[in-house]
Image (cartoon, grey):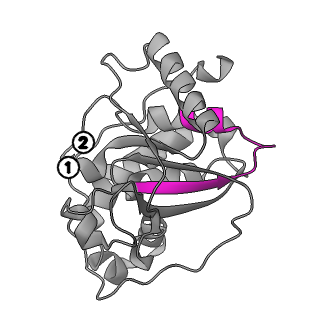
Amino acid sequence: MSFLVGLGIIGGIAAACGAFDPAPQKEVAPQADMKGDALVVGGGCFWCIEPLFEMIKGVKHVESGYAGGHRANPSYEQVSAGSSGHAEVVKIIYDPKMISQHDLLTLFFTMHDPTTKDRQGPDSGPMYRSVVFYETPEQKALAEKVMAEITKEKIWPNKLVTTLEPLRNYATAEDYHQDYYKKYESGNLIKRAGMNAGYCSVVIEPKVRKFKEKYKHLLRD
């Protein structure tokens, strides 16, 4: 339980994740080094969760995607309409010798509000549900253990509503979603004007800043 000591809530969501420049077709980002253990979670808009996990020591790659729906390879439009049953998720590839899945899950439960059903701030719908996807009974049991720890420590005043679901129909999100905030950070004014700059500056940027301040000891060099 020592990892829970000092963990706080990285929250404060306002604005919406939906309005941005649409891509004419689905382009998949090139695959990075995907060797390592994997964890797939959803905690609202994947633009918000992706940059936080990317900063953590031991995390090798973070990919935005969709999971848990009833159709294969859905588009963003199908997911955001709620017609596919998918959640916006991130797939985290990590080195278990450097950070455990237990600790990644514990951090996940402080990155978003796991007590609001199908909602993160103004982003609402089943695609924004709080969810942990598992591939084995052991992964499910670990998620249950972490949720019990979070509840016992009263990290959140309200009951957790995070669902535990078997991983199915995972699909990589379109290329323009990958590293969205990183592209915003490095972009000039013209590039930012073509992105959802309001959401990035009002919602994601404060979350990233708070995360950096609170978890300096966990960040990669």
Locate the N terminus by quadrant: top right
Residue type beneath disc 2 = Asp
Above or below, comparing residue 177 to residue 29 in the picture: above
- Image disc number at residue 64: none
Q: Quadrant of residue 2?
A: top right
Q: Quadrant of residue 20?
A: bottom left
Spatial separation of the CA atoms under disc 2 and disc 1: 5 Å
Q: Residue at (54%, 56%) from the top-left corner?
A: 91
Q: Quadrant of residue 145?
A: top right
Above or below, comparing residue 155 to residue 127 in the picture: above
Residue 117 image offset from top left, x and y in percent? 24, 35
Q: Is residue 102 magenta?
A: yes
Residue 204 image offset from top left, x and y in percent? 37, 53
Residue 160 image offset from top left, x and y in percent? 35, 25
Residue 151 image offset from top left, x and y in percent? 44, 16
Q: Residue at (24%, 69%) from the top-left corner?
A: 78
Q: Is residue 6 left or right of residue 41?
A: right
How many numbered marks, from 0 up?
A: 2
Q: Is residue 213 left or right of residue 46?
A: right
Magenta range: 89-106
Q: Residue at (38%, 38%) from the top-left corner?
A: 112
Closest to the observer, 40 or 111: 40
**Element marked by disc 1:** loop
Residue 81, visible in the rendered structure: yes
What residue is shown with label 1?
A: 125
Q: Earlier in the sequence, mark 2 or mark 1?
A: 2
What residue is shown with label 2?
A: 118
